[in-house]
Amino acid sequence: MRATLRWAHSDLRTHRGEALFIVLATAGIVASLLLATALFGYATNPWQRIFTQSRGAHVWLHTVGPADTARLSALDGVESVAGPYATESVTVSSRGTRATVELRATPSRPSVGRPLLTSGHWLDPRRPDGVVLENRLARALLAEPGDTLTLPGTTRALTVVGTADSAEPRYRPGEQPGLVWAPPSAVRDPGGRVIGLRLKDPGDTDYAVQRAVTVLGAGAVGEVSTWQQARAEAQGDNRLLGQVLGLFGLGALLAAGFAVHGAIATRIRGHLRDISVLKAIGFTPGQVVRIFLLQHVAYALLGAVAAALLTQALGAGVPGRLGDAVGVWQGLPGHTVSLLAVPVGAVLFIGAVTGLAAWRAGRVPPVPVPGGTGAPGGRLPGVARRALGPRLLGLRLPPALVLGSHKAFTRRPRTLATVGRLALPLLLIVVAMSAWTTIDRFHTSPERLGLPAALTVRADRGLSDTATRALLEHENGVRAVYPGVEVAALVPGQTATIALRGLGTHDDPYPYALAEGRPADGPDEAVAGQGLLDLLDVRVGDWVRMTVGDQPQILHIVGRSIEPENAGRVISTSLDTLRENDPRLAPTLYQLRLRPGADPHQVAAALATAGHGHLDVHTVTNPADGLSPLRAVIAGLICVLALIGLIELLTAIGGTVREGERDLLALKAIGLSPRQVTAITVTSTTCTAAAATATATALGLPLSHWLINTQGRTSGIGAGIATTPSPALFTLFITAAIAGAAALSTLPATRAAHHRSADTLSAVA
């Protein structure tokens, strides 16, 4: 044991930098995997907890006009019913912020879909103007118990008496109205009713929706929302962050395993004589294997423990969503198991690849085999001998350049393994750069990713269409105004609702971002999001039939648009097309494109002031806003991957220097100076790094496009959002990889070139 520890200590002193990089890389990998686990728990658990505690309804049906909702409780598979509750759509304002909300007449606290109070108290019959706000709506309005909400354009006012969590779809400005529970007396102009169905089997949701719509009649159902939609929306970007962290964490763990395997294999080749001596003095093959195995498992264990302790102690203090996710995750029942399982799994994986490489050390014979590590000293290949001549292929090339490049690719299996191990972390860096560029493109060019409009405006009944458009076009920052309507439509089979949107006119069409097909510029033509195509199992070129109230609408899908809203479940056409079926249809919203340089918030404030309370103006939500934490995550992952690449690069440099000791005497004998000998090693390392960088770029670009577009397709936005990093960024990446390899190899190559002849003779003896 003492000899084993002395060997390990000696090896640690010789390879301090490599040991430090292994510890840091392992810590980064384990930390990223722990954060991914926290984000997955944060994305799923809060909504699931609320849904369970509130006995949430699996289906919510919004009806228009009279409908016999009492028959729904008798449907097969329905366990219990919430409501029906009368509803009224209004706009409320608090502290200068406006929001469209649904006032829900709730005479008593429901048992199904029961709101979970977080502050204040429930509705009091003695307070006819008291209301309870859903938490996300309350945060948007900066409202808390005791505040007063005004209804612009009226003399009505509501008092907030409490806030509550709900498992229903949450408030999204301009898309999903906020939920307000109110006494029946506060709902003065009901526009419909809502009823919730709690099912015995959540898997029968689609069938239950179909049966409910059949019972009520398609014309009576205005909108359907299900628990799957609410859960997917609640998970939102947190799940995406977890997927990105998990994907890169696993990729980095694989790269680190290969790097450790390569480091041990290279070290074994360079210490064959030492290992033989160990065996000659009595070390068994198992003891030799344990030396390498325990040493590298100790490095991995140190990094894993450090990552677990830092994540546990400081993770909740990270500002933003990551800190919130860790804080919630630490309170979940499976937190302790995950905190132990992830580091243990990472250490076991690194131990497995370490044992595989160390097993080769145990097979080294006690008597070294001459010439096993390289070509006999002094013999140079034919290409090398010709390179020392005055000309090669008509070009006068420096001998160091030719010899170095030849040395890099002489041993094909070993060279390919080295290039592959170095290319893996570089490939993941290319993928990370592509993800960063795609997020940046959402911010800088939203119109190319389905967000040409910066503001959404809704006018109340006090303004006509003509007056509204004149008011909007008069604002200096507005470049174009597109009138439109958006209604909920029942899909064929009546199992779900989608958003049917009519924007722009034939003369002034809305500039959709198309990824496939062509614009909808003819009668009954439309473009659809990926989520709708997947939901209906249709493709571009198909005709689809949907129902708006009791009015059927048949449209020809001629293109696929990049659609970031409503999970891509949107079919869009022009307002003129919708007016062909209903000439009385009037615009209910206006999408505004702004002039270059115009600030959306300033324009929104100016329009709200000019509208004198008749305009409800919202900035269009950019999906990239929720992905801001991803930039910091990507930057950290790039650092971890760079550490792994550095480990592999140092391994390759060490192997090249040790293998070059056999040729050192021959190179000096034919007249090469120490500087030229140094250049041979630097050139060899640079060629290896260049080959790895070229491989990473050639494979990383298509892989990153596939991964990003696959994520876009599964989220409903659709493929076609992946962006290639700029040439300047690629040039910086390639230059840093190749120049870094050359710089790192210069010092050890210089030391090796100045070795004394006696040292070299002892090395090859």
Image (spheres, rainbow, N blue to C red):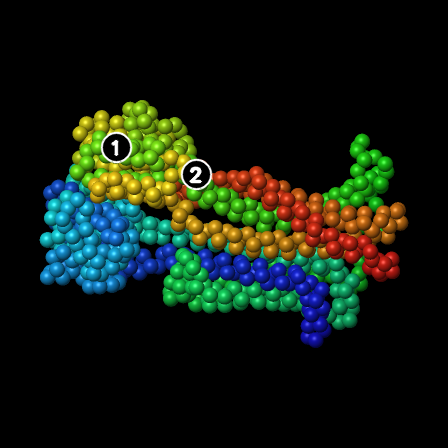
- Image quarter hosting the C terminus: bottom right
Left or right of 213 on screen, residue 236: right
Residue 299's image quarter? bottom right
Q: Count the marks: how many?
A: 2
Going from N to C along the chain, the mark reached first, 2 or 1, is 2
Residue receiving disc 1: 469
Residue 173 in the image: x percent, y percent?
29, 46
The residue positioned 29% from the left and 52% from the top of the image is 140
Up/down of 445 relative to 170, above or below: above
Between residue 5 and residue 487, name the one nearer to us.
487
Q: What element carries label 2?
A: loop
Left or right of 99 on screen, residue 735: right
Residue receiving disc 2: 445
Residue 172 in the image: x percent, y percent?
30, 48
The residue positioned 82% from the left and 39% from the top of the image is 387
Gap between marks 2 and 1 measured at Cα? 26 Å
- Asked if residue 584 can be seen in this view, the reply is yes
Left or right of 107 on screen, residue 704: right
The three-letter code of the residue at mark 1 reads: Arg
Residue 543 in the image: x percent, y percent?
31, 29
Q: Return the mark for residue 509.
A: none
- Asked if residue 537 can be seen in this view, the reply is no
The residue positioned 70% from the left and 49% from the top of the image is 742
Residue 381 in the image: x percent, y percent?
82, 43
Front label number (2 vs 1): 1
The three-letter code of the residue at mark 2 reads: Ser
At label 1, counting other C-alpha atoms closer than 10 Å, the crowd grade (few under 14, some 14-19, many 20 or more) is some
The residue positioned 58% from the left and 61% from the top of the image is 24
Q: Mark 2 and mark 1 in contact? Answer it, CB < 8 Å.
A: no
At label 2, counting other C-alpha atoms closer than 10 Å, the crowd grade (few under 14, some 14-19, many 20 or more) is few
